[in-house]
Image (cartoon, grey):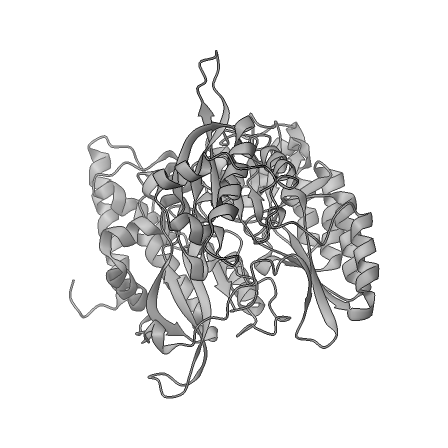
């Protein structure tokens, strides 16, 4: 195209040409597509049109989005609720635009996933959510691995009341499922962490509201994750996200003015064996949202709409390379981003692996936050109310974490003992063994149709079995995930379990796991390696006991982590060590 046109005009003409190509295809009997929109949905319609014009066949979800915008189905939600019916066909997918997941056959009900930017809730919101859980759901919630909450066991008739109740609390579930940007995560200790370089919560909130108020940020080729890490003691695990912004301090004498910036990583998706990669740029905090928008729009235009398995941003980058992707981002922005080698920035302060559990000093004098240990992320409505009451007593906030637990802030030093008693009276704890503190499990087959096993139930069984038998003195992360979607991110666990159906020669396969070791994120970034396949669920606790016992007996020093130990040996050597007869009292 001639250089006389602006980039915006070029994109319009490309879309128009693609539409003409489709019109010609339709004359030949091809399936018609909806006419291109003229508003914010146009970017998606043009991308679909280019796909069809190039001979591609849209997947069913793309056809559904072309015919009906998932944001515009309120009347249909109300109608089915009045009739007491659940959605069918591709409407099941479109209902997820409102955070409503029909989870049959696991449960004949909806799960509702919220959006809680940065994972931060007020006591009023937590108390209100407890009421909604009782009125419209099963009377409990689950903390997710995106520092978020899910309500479950919602009947067909309860959805309008639940969605209206969320709005009245200043919350929403819009865009929390389907092909949308998921909950924006940030550092859970933002604003209270003496170690942090910057408070991430303002940017989490700004990104959250930017998404909610820009329709073109919905209906992407596939789901999308964004995280901000401020350099505090508790990580947001930003390198597992499609976009990870992580704070750095630039000292004097570099090519950009000294100060705190965000570096940007792109392409993280550990379920597909990839971490996000640093793009070599430093971005002033005030510019991060616009940069994120440009990254997303490039994905919208170039993401695969013909194959759901290859529809994440990682695969666009794999195809064209990081350099080309960033060139497209800068074209969207209309300017170049400042480049700075990572080694010219000060190193990130180290993460405290158990900074999300127990009492820890805040940067505010004589104030502490406490991390509560939740049994695989589950909270009853009564516990939710008690947590809200406790936080309100000290004018504190509630912070959800990616480790499926929560923090309560602003506790005076002299009140710590009273808070301990209050937490115990809820049936919860502020203490956790090194095993339970890092125990993460996805929903499992009790509430998710994709899961091959009862991950939450098995996680509790594993913890109960290990704690009296293995005297762990260092943290270990054990992640159980029910399917290839890897919601519990088994590839970044010290020990990761991926659910599988195991053939034992009987009439039916039984629940079991493939076991992985050596994963980590941040400064310990590594993808776990498989060491065992098809371990029956009933044998997993003893198998993991042998693994931990072998670690304690063979580590080089008392400070050597399980990850370091595991990654010093190949898989065969590890299996030999794990199979040694080591006492349960190791």
Q: Is residue 26 above or below residue 262?
A: above
The image quadrant that residue 98 belongs to is top right
Identity of the residue furthest to the bottom in this view: 253
Across and down, in percent, residue 572 comes to: 35, 38
Residue at 76% in and 53% down: 387
> Could you tell whether 438 is left or right of 40 in the image?
right
Identity of the residue furthest to the left in this view: 2
Indicate the quadrant containing the N terminus: top left, top right, bottom left or bottom right.
bottom left
> Could you tell whether 529 is left or right of 452 in the image?
left
Q: Is residue 197 above or below residue 304?
A: below
Indicate the quadrant containing the C terminus: top left, top right, bottom left or bottom right.
top right
Q: Is residue 368 above or below residue 260?
A: above
> Could you tell whether 217 is left or right of 174 in the image?
left
Which of these two is toward me, 424 or 183?
424
Across and down, in percent, residue 42 comes to: 37, 53
Which of these two is toward me, 251 or 540?
540
Which of these two is toward me, 550 or 387?
550
Identity of the residue furthest to the top in this view: 507
Residue at 52% in and 74% down: 197
Examine the rendering and report whether any part of residue 64 can be seen.
no
Examine the rendering and report whether any part of residue 374 can be seen.
yes
Count of numbered tags: 0
Across and down, in percent, residue 296 comes to: 39, 57
The image quadrant that residue 105 belongs to is top right
Across and down, in percent, residue 130 comes to: 74, 46
Which of these two is toward me, 525 or 293?
525
């Amino acid at each position: 195209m001639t250089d006389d046109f602006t980039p915006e005009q070029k994109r319009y003409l490309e879309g128009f040409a693609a539409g003409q190509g489709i019109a010609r295809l339709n004359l030949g009997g091809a399936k018609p597509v909806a006419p291109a929109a003229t508003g914010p949905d146009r970017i998606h319609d043009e991308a679909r049109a280019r796909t069809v014009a190039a001979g591609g066949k849209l997947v069913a979800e793309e056809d559904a989005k072309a015919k009906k915008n998932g944001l515009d189905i309120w009347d249909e939600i109300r109608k089915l609720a009045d009739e007491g019916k659940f959605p069918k066909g591709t409407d099941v997918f479109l209902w997820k635009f409102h955070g409503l997941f029909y989870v049959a056959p696991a449960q004949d009900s909806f799960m509702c996933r919220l959006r809680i930017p940065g994972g931060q809730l007020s006591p009023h919101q937590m108390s209100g959510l407890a009421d909604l859980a009782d009125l419209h759901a099963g009377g409990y919630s689950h903390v997710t691995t995106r520092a978020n909450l899910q309500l479950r066991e919602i009947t067909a008739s309860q959805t309008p009341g639940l969605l209206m109740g969320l709005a009245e609390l200043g919350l929403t579930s819009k865009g929390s499922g389907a092909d949308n940007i998921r909950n924006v995560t940030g550092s859970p200790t933002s604003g209270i962490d003496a170690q942090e370089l910057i408070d991430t919560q303002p940017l989490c909130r700004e990104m959250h509201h930017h998404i909610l108020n820009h329709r073109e940020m919905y209906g992407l080729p596939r789901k999308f994750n964004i995280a901000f890490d401020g350099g505090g003691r508790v990580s947001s695990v930003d390198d597992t996200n499609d976009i990870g912004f992580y704070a750095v301090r630039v000292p004097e004498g570099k090519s950009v003015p000294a100060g705190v910036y965000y570096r940007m990583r792109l392409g993280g998706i550990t379920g597909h064996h990839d971490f996000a990669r640093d793009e070599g740029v430093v971005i002033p905090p005030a510019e991060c949202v616009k940069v994120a928008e440009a990254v997303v729009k490039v994905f919208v235009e170039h993401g695969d709409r013909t194959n759901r398995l290859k529809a994440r941003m990682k695969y666009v980058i794999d195809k064209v390379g990081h350099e080309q992707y960033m060139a497209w981002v800068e074209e969207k922005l209309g300017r170049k981003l400042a480049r700075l080698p990572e080694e010219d920035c000060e190193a990130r302060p180290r993460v405290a692996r158990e900074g999300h559990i127990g009492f820890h000093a805040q940067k505010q004098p004589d104030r502490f936050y406490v991390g509560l240990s939740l049994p695989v992320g589950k909270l009853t409505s009564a516990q939710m109310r008690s947590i809200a009451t406790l936080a309100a007593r000290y004018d504190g906030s509630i912070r959800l974490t990616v480790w499926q637990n929560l923090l309560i802030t602003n506790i005076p030093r002299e009140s710590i003992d009273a808070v301990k008693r209050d937490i115990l009276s809820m049936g919860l704890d502020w203490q956790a063994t090194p095993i339970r503190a890092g125990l993460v499990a996805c929903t499992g087959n009790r509430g998710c149709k994709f899961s091959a096993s009862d991950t939450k139930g098995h996680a509790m069984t594993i913890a109960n079995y290990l704690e009296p038998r293995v005297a762990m003195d260092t943290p270990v992360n054990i992640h159980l995930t029910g399917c290839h979607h890897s919601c519990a991110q088994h590839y970044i666990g010290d020990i990761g379990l991926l659910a599988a159906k195991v053939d034992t020669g009987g009439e039916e396969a039984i629940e079991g796991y493939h076991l992985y070791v050596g994963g980590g994120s941040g400064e310990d970034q590594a993808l776990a390696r498989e060491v065992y396949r098809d371990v029956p669920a009933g044998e997993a606790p003893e198998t993991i006991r042998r693994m931990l016992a072998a670690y304690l007996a063979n580590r080089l020093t008392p400070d050597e982590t399980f990850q370091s130990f595991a990654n010093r040996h190949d898989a065969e050597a590890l299996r030999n060590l794990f199979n040694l007869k080591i006492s349960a009292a190791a």
